[in-house]
Image: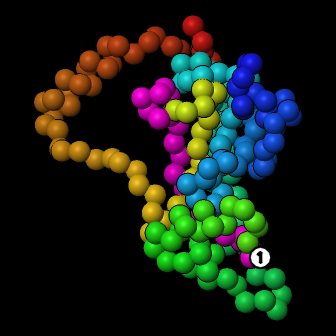
Amino acid sequence: MNGCIFCEIVAGRAEASVVYEDDSVMAILDLHPAAIGHTLVIPRTHMTGLTDASDEIGAPLWRAARRVAAGLRAAANPPAPAGSPPATASEAAGGAGVAGLEGVAGGSETARGSGNAGVRCEGVRLSLADGEAAGQEVFHLHLHVVPRYPGDGIVIAAGGRRRARGLLDRDAALIRDALPGWATGSGRGGD
Ligand SMILES: [Zn+2]
């Protein structure tokens, strides 16, 4: 699509640091990472939101995200080269606690260190923003794969007051009744 930065990247007309690619998807590093290694998995074909994303593209997106997640964990714990001591986690992150984010800011200009190059990954968070209200900024579908570790300083607002079962049941019925009648695996998308 004209003017879409991810389409430009897919077409090879814009720069990206590619982690993985196949016939259906590309996985590229976020230019403004929440943590070192923050990856975006994007379909090669332009689509905006979840409604556009058929089961056919969902499977490759999910497969690539799982693969990248495994790669992040492995990159954070590479086999130590012979004769060199392994970097400690705090060295890798540029400090302790919230300094992980400073590590991102401080480390973005140059490749730092050796070994895991600053990737720290003790857990992985997947997220996908569908729509501006959800925080979507680039309107070409993308699945975030974010490496996480304790004290990484990433804040994800979640959680609220406990909702009574009766209200939850009512909410569930409302949503159930509104579900579109898509056949499982039909790959429906777009319309
Ligand atoms: Zn696009």
> Quick check: can you spot residue 24?
no
Percent x, y of residue 48: 60, 22
Q: Does the magenta portion include 38?
A: no
Residue segment shown in magenta: 113-135
Q: Quadrant of the N terminus?
A: top right
Q: Residues within 10 Å of mark 1 (few under 14, many from 20)?
A: few
What colour-coding does the image apply? Answer: rainbow
From the image, tell me which residue sits under label 1.
114
Q: Is residue 84 left or right of residue 171?
A: right
Dominant secondary structure of the magenta stretch?
loop
Percent x, y of residue 182: 51, 13
Asked whether 8 or 128 is in front, the reply is 8
Element at label 1? loop
Q: Is residue 131 left or right of residue 113?
A: left
Asked whether 163 or 33 is in front, the reply is 33
Seen at 72% across and 31% down, the residue is 5
Seen at 54% across and 78% down, the residue is 95
Q: Does the magenta portion include 122?
A: yes
Q: Is residue 132 left or right of residue 113?
A: left
Residue found farthest to the bottom: 83
Seen at 67% across and 66% down, the residue is 107
> Quick check: can you spot residue 16?
yes
Quadrant housing residue 178: top left
* Amino acid found under the numbered disc labelled 1: Ser
Percent x, y of residue 143: 60, 39
Asked whether 32 or 181 is in front, the reply is 32
